[in-house]
């Protein structure tokens, strides 16, 4: 199943506009966690961001002493330049890596569902037949033809050897295209096709605001409407021509001012940096292990429990 971010993208296209006050999030980055980021109520969000959504609960089973030992080993892995400090950038790289490993595991869990002939490849026909042939997607009465067209476009973009069969790397790119550089152009084009109502090849301010369900000229605008308008004019429209071309759209979707991984890395450093030098020592991380791993620790779940290095 395509991850929630893209399902939302596809179904918004197929089923029309949402409620007038509902704001779309088009940033092409997966959420680090579905938990609320509220540190005063617990650190579940931070645990899933640092460890991975499926892995985090497993580490509550570890005794405190063992979890601290393993957290120390993780810190050594995160410290790629071996200077005995963990920077925001090193944390961001780690968090991004954890999330991408999680996406690959999600793909692995779905592989046998779609590889029906067990040949080690998933053809477009296999995927399409398995997902849509039972008619369950038609129960709502909506026409999913546009969704299927977009899925096929993504599948073809992921299929780098153009044989209409996906190996695991290609299928992962299809399921999680936001993680793969070569998938960006098709995602950008899909976005432009949806928003560019006058078909001039650009996204103008009116189209941008319409996409956010914020009609221009209304007095009673939703909260944040003027901020969105100014962001379009001041940040997104870099050449100040009043519209977004393909490159500007790509920058908007894939180069946000602060990504989820950036924000979480900054948060972890800010909350754990006792001497306020902008970076973390192993001691500072271990002293704040509740934020990073709770009573647990690490990287990729049960697999690590079996690794000799632990």
Image (tube, rainbow, N blue to C red):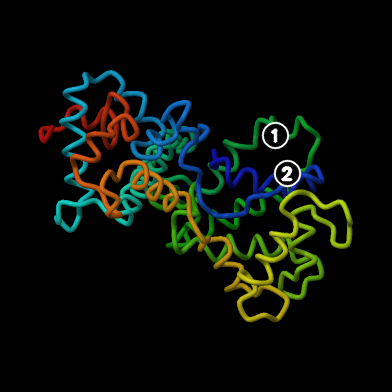
Badge 2 local density, few (<14 within 10 Å), some, or many (20+)?
some
How far across and down, in percent of the image, does residue 107 sit?
43, 40
Give the number of the disc on residue 144. 2
Quadrant of the image for the C terminus? top left
119 relative to 295 in the view: left or right: right
Q: Nearer the viewer, residue 300 or 74?
A: 74
Q: Are marks 2 and 1 in contact (CB under 8 Å)?
A: yes
From this view, report whether residue 302 is shown above or below residue 260. Answer: above
Q: Which structural element holds mark 1? A: helix
First reached walking from the N terminus: tag 2 or tag 1: 1
Q: Which structural element holds mark 2? A: loop
Residue beneath disc 1: 137
Q: Nearer the viewer, residue 287 or 244?
A: 287
Q: Nearer the viewer, residue 80 or 192?
A: 80
Q: Measuring 54% from the left and 54% from the top, which residue is drawn there?
A: 28
Q: Residue 117: which quarter of the image?
A: top left
Q: How many marks?
A: 2
Give the number of the disc on residue 50. none
61 relative to 143 in the view: left or right: left
How far across and down, in percent of the image, does residue 226 sit?
74, 60
How far across and down, in percent of the image, does residue 73 sit?
16, 39
Q: Measuring 28% from the left and 18% from the top, which residue is drawn there?
A: 61
Q: Nearer the viewer, residue 201 or 274?
A: 274
How far across and down, in percent of the image, does residue 100 sit?
38, 47
């Amino acid at each position: 199943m395509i991850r929630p971010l893209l399902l939302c993208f596809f179904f918004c296209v197929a089923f029309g506009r949402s409620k007038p006050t509902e704001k779309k999030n088009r940033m092409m980055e997966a959420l680090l966690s579905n938990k609320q980021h509220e540190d005063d109520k617990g650190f579940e969000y931070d645990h899933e961001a640092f460890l991975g959504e499926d892995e985090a609960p497993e580490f509550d089973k570890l005794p405190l002493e063992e979890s601290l030992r393993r957290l120390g080993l993780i810190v050594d892995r995160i410290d790629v330049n071996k200077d005995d400090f963990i920077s925001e950038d090193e944390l961001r790289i780690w968090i991004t890596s954890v999330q991408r490993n999680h996406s690959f595991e999600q793909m692995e869990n779905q592989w046998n569902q779609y590889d029906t002939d067990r040949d080690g490849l998933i053809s477009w026909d296999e995927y399409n037949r398995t997902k849509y042939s039972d008619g369950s997607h038609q129960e709502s009465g909506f026409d999913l033809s546009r969704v299927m067209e977009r899925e096929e476009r993504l599948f073809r973009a992921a299929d780098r050897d153009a044989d209409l069969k996906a190996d695991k790397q290609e299928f992962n790119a299809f399921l999680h295209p936001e993680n793969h550089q070569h998938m960006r152009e098709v995602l950008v084009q899909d976005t432009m096709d949806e928003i560019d109502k006058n078909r001039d090849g650009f996204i103008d301010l009116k189209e941008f605001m319409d996409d956010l369900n914020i009609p221009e000229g209304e007095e009673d605008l939703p909260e944040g409407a003027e901020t969105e308008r100014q962001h379009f004019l001041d940040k997104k429209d870099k050449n100040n021509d009043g519209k977004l071309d393909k490159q500007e759209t790509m920058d908007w979707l894939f180069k946000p001012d602060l990504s989820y991984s950036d924000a979480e890395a900054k948060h972890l450093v800010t909350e754990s940096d006792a001497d306020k030098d902008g970076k973390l020592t192993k001691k500072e991380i271990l002293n704040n292990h509740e934020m990073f791993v709770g009573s647990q620790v690490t990287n990729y779940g049960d697999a690590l429990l079996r690794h000799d290095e632990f």
